[in-house]
Amino acid sequence: MRYEDPWYDALASGWGESDGPGGQVPVPGPGIAPARREGGDEAVVDVYLEVQRSAAFREVRSTYRRFVVPGVVVFLSWYVGYVVAATTAPGLMARPVAGAVNVAMLAGLGQFLTTFLFAWAYARHARLRRDRAALELRWDTQELTRGAQGGVA
Amino acid sequence: MTGNHQTLALILFSAFIAVTLAITTWVSRNRHGSAEEFYAGGRLFSPMENGFAIAGDYMSAASFLGVTGLIALFGYDGLLYVVGFLVAWLVVLFLVAELVRNCGRFTLADVVAARMSERPVRIAAGTSSVTVSVLYLVAQMVGAGSLVALLLGGTSPAARAWTVIGVGALMVIYVSLGGMRATTWIQIVKAVLLLAGTIVLTVLVLLRFHGDFDRLLLTAAGRSGHGDAFLTPGLKYGGDWTARFDFISLGLALVLGTAGLPHILSRFYTVPTARAARRSALWSIGLIGGFYLMTIVLGLGAAAIVGPEAIRGSNAAGNTAVPLLALDVGGGANSTGGTILFAVVAAVAFATILAVVAGITLASSASVAHDLYASLRRGHAKPRSEVAVARVASVGIGVVAIALGLLARDLNVAFLVGLAFAVAASANLPALLYSLFWRGFTTRGAVWAVYGGLIPALVLVVLSPVVSGSPESLFPGVDFQYFPLQNPGLVSIPMGFLAGWLGTVTSGEVPDEAKHAETEVRSLTGAGAA
């Protein structure tokens, strides 16, 4: 599995190696950010603000949100609707469809089906619309942070 | 139960323990005990491996024993659990998996604390993570107790207590010696065993009904004594409005809780990239979905073949429906096939419990060491000593879980897990989502979001009929029940979100633009990810 992932090697070799210009660990760990105290502080902070404002990043963000927000709204409403219907409309849920299978059973299995479909659609959307741009931004951002730290140190 | 069951099940189970201990020893050779290694297994698992491990973590005794028991006893109302358990994965996949992988290092608190004043947020998120984990652990311990009571024939309290203690001791060994790497491999082995066992049972049940699902439904409904009502919602949660609101509350907790479970979130740190995290979530959705479809067949099969009286007679909450079903579809109580299948299923269930317990213990000891210990002793703990603390913490958590597991032994396992989900959804999810998606979120908001969900959830459970005031309560003798619902989610989840919002708008703190930029850029691109 690991080797079928076209980005696997690229990412594994590109991060965590301490061969940055300053000889420091080039990437600050999230949350703890040891490199922050070295004086590259302001510059690194500016890198993230700059990237956040860039058109490329805003495109990635809105691509993500345009898919995720409606997606979450739809599947949560469908799920909550199902739960509420199960409690408030037992008559509807008990209506037979074919043999012993009733509306409730179909709705439950429908939840399984839509979950698989949503998961597949999300993965496809991310793979086709978002991954490449996000990866490029990742390299650019890391180059910039490395430059910012190296420049000060 | 005859002696054959016991002997065979014990042999199989011992084999599983031997194999997993061998794995633990093998993977922990030549390891330097770095935090990266202990908490995240070196971050080099493949998506498929991690997908199986996530499925292993998630398909707990609650699903295998508890949910099937609920379906067998209450028909359609048990099915709500599996739907909720599965749909919850969409929340994880869409909103959490990739972003958490990009932003955090080891724990949930890493993500929430990244933008905030670190110490109070870390303490809050660490506390709630440990609470959720302990509740979840109790459910697994109760499952272990029910199983052994069945296996040894009687309900000898001493045997149950010793099983629970034995499970606790083993998990501490796995976790403290092997860390995440050993725990992950144990999950993978267990997921394969559990899926294989479930497939065999499902096929046997369907063969019994000549592949006719309709007849399975009709037989189950007829045998249940409820007729058509068995196949429609309302048997357990119908009737008065209290029960109906309980059902809605449970539904909410299930769908929102998964994304706040610490042991599930920490699994995403074991793969190298966000893309790998997404793919492991996809693998796990496939595996978990397939598994739950089969548990529906098993639950209905238990109702149709074993019958509710026999299930209730063995364990009032239904936790032993699947082993009883195995005995029956294998050929009956005194046949070789029945004995073997029963022993296999019991051993698989034990393995399931052990593996899940190890996963949760690891996640909660990570919270204790990485979040609580590191924050409370001020200054930064050295990674090395942090791992030592985590090893000690796993012992402490084991002891607490054992004690509570002995106390709660008569509650349905799936129901107990429902409580853990409610607490996770109330305390962890609001803080996590706000810090990932809300630009203006502040430190006070984060702290309030955690405590504002955690405290109401716990208080409402204490005041609920689960603890007192009804014959099935933990303390049937006393009555301090003031909250009618068994599951607090309906009230406590909105309270968590509300408290987070309120804390943010009332705090004077100006949200740090730069840190928000950093979180957002990191979460979506993976720049600087550990």
Image: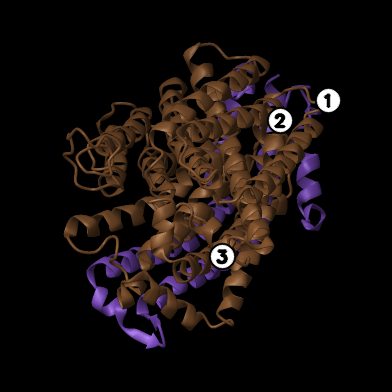
Distance CA(mark 2)–CA(mark 3): 38 Å
Please, what secondary structure does the residue beneath circle 2 have?
helix
Q: Amino acid at mark 3?
A: Asp
Distance CA(mark 3)–CA(mark 1): 47 Å
Distance CA(mark 1)–CA(mark 2): 11 Å
Side of B256 relative to B266 (left or right): left
Chain brown in the figure, letter = B
Where residue B495 sits: x, y (%)? 27, 41
For mark 2, does the 10 Å Cα neighbourhood hold few (<14), some (14 to 19), or many (20 or more) residues?
A: many
Comes first in the chain, label 2 or label 3: 2
Contact (Cβ within 8 Å) of mark 2 with mark 3: no
Per the image, the residue denoted by label 3 is B328
Closer to the camera, A122 or B157?
B157
Closer to the camera, A143 or B261?
B261
Residue drawn at (63%, 45%), measured in percent from left and top? Answer: B351
Where residue B76 sits: x, y (%)? 37, 68
Can you say which quadrant of the picture contains the C terminus of chain B?
top right
Please, what secondary structure does the residue beneath circle 3 have?
helix
Residue drawn at (44%, 63%), measured in percent from left and top? Answer: B83
Closer to the camera, B220 or A46?
B220
Per the image, the residue denoted by label 2 is B178
Please, what secondary structure does the residue beneath circle 1 have?
loop
Residue at the bottom extreme? A98
Per the image, the residue denoted by label 1 is B30
Residue B105, placed above or below residue A77: above
Chain purple in the figure, letter = A
Protein chain holding label 3: B
Residue B457 visible within the image: yes
Comes first in the chain, label 3 or label 1: 1
